[in-house]
């Protein structure tokens, strides 16, 4: 089975309110890429991956007028994708939903949120998590701007497993003016993100403690050694979600980054830094598996146009990956 995680930058901007693709020469949300160019590129990438299930991060919006499911199933029909069904969870207010596209001939996936909204431990992901963020003996309330998507999955062969799609909060200090304000807001945002990671880890521990097979995937917006605030707090969100002791989740790219000292870690995203006139590469996207799934012959691959020889050698695919998004797909092939 092939399972992928893919953050598609401004996917929502490619559809009208009826979920129809806007194939025209107007600019997309991507820098110097038209909507027609991004749509064509995404169609090529999704077709080339040919996954049984794709966790789409920053999926099209759901609101009173728009529908994530309608848009993505229309996209799948336009490019004749096997992953032609879509399931979503709790909608959010960011125009960036989390959704799973899947092949109904291979598996069935249902939204299956766990926990109670007001539970003191591992509350439901549309609820509130209470934790002392700043060591002042006062409980703070943390919420997810993008609640993780919890799924119960059953394969055609009858194998049951859990999937969680995630997109943790960005640490960007929006609205801050001046160095001190930027630092204060960055630290506050980092505290909130680490609290979300602790919340997420509590749910992961529940599944692993019950012996359930689990795949957690998506954009954690964080990674080992990504910024200076990791030194202040001691560890990254990725390390928290993976776990300190057994049973742990596993992703080989995360493990490589944790061990990297003098070598560059893998990367899944590429951003243009305008003031510095250069590109920044980062490891932000992961597909983590439970210990039992490590015995199912898992093979990971980042479809990076400059780091993966096959992606580099196929010029049309290379250009499509660059035009489609500022993130690249992370693909897991596994015997399920």
Image: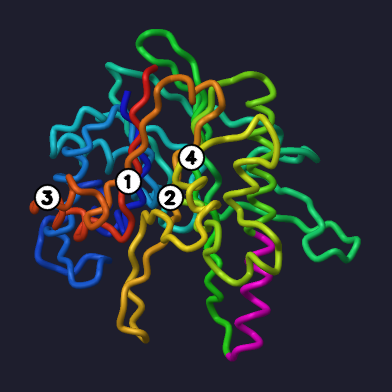
Which residue is under mark 2?
A: 285
| Residue tagged 3 | 313
Residue 302's disc number: 1
Front position among marks 2 and 4: 4
Q: Earlier in the sequence, mark 3 or mark 2?
A: 2
Please give the residue where the numbered disc 4 appears in the rendered image. Answer: 251
Neighbor class of circle 4 (other Cα within 10 Å; few <14, some 14-19, many 20+) is many
**Residue 209: percent from the left, percent from the top?**
69, 24
In the figure, 294 relative to 164: above or below? above
Mark 3 and mark 1: span between their CA atoms? 15 Å
Marks 3/2: CA–CA distance: 23 Å
Q: Is residue 188 magenta?
A: yes
The x, y position of residue 284, in whole percent, is: 45, 55
Q: Could you tell me which secondary element the residue under label 2 belongs to?
A: strand
Horizontal side, residue 44 vs residue 332: left or right = left
Q: Nearer the viewer, mark 3 or mark 2?
A: 3
* Figure check: 323 above or below 250: below
In the image, what residue occupies the spot 32% across and 73% down? Answer: 279
Q: Residues within 10 Å of mark 2 (few under 14, many from 20)?
A: many
The stretch of residues the image draws in magenta is 178-192
Tell me which numbered mark, 2 or 1, is placed earlier along the sequence. 2
Label 3, secondary structure: give it. helix
Are circles 2 and 1 on residues that touch, CB within 8 Å?
yes
Residue at image position (37%, 86%) is 275
User: Circle 1 sits in a helix, a strand or a loop, which is it?
Assistant: strand
Q: Is residue 259 above or below residue 134?
A: above
């Amino acid at each position: 089975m092939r399972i992928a995680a893919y953050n598609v930058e401004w996917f929502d901007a490619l559809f009208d309110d009826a979920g129809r693709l806007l194939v025209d020469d107007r600019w997309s949300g991507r820098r110097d890429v038209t909507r027609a160019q991004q749509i064509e590129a995404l169609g090529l990438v999704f077709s080339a991956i040919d996954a049984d299930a794709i966790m789409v991060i920053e999926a099209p919006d759901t609101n009173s007028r728009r529908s994530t499911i309608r848009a993505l199933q229309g996209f799948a029909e336009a490019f004749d994708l096997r992953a032609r069904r879509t399931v979503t969870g709790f909608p959010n207010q960011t125009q960036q939903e989390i959704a799973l596209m899947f092949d109904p001939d291979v598996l069935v996936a249902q939204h299956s949120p766990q926990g109670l909204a007001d539970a003191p431990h591992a509350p439901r992901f549309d609820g509130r998590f209470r934790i002392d963020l700043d060591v002042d003996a006062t409980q703070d309330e943390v919420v997810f701007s993008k609640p993780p998507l919890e799924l119960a999955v059953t394969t055609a062969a009858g194998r049951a497993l859990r999937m969680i799609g995630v997109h943790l909060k960005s640490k960007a200090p929006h609205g801050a003016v001046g160095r001190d304000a930027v630092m204060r807001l960055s630290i506050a945002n980092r505290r909130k993100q680490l609290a979300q990671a602790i919340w997420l880890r509590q749910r992961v521990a529940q599944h692993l403690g019950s012996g359930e097979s689990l795949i957690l995937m998506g954009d954690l917006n964080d990674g080992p050694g990504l910024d200076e605030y990791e030194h202040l707090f001691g560890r990254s969100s990725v390390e928290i979600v993976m776990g300190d002791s057994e049973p742990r989740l596993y992703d080989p790219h995360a493990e490589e980054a944790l061990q990297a000292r003098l070598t560059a870690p893998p990367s899944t995203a590429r951003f243009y830094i305008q003031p510095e006139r250069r590109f920044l590469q980062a490891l932000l996207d992961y597909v983590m598996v439970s210990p039992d799934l490590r015995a199912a012959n898992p093979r990971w691959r980042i479809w990076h146009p400059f780091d993966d020889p096959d992606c580099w050698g196929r010029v049309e695919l290379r250009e499509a990956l660059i035009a489609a998004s500022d993130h690249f797909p992370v693909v897991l092939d596994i015997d399920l």
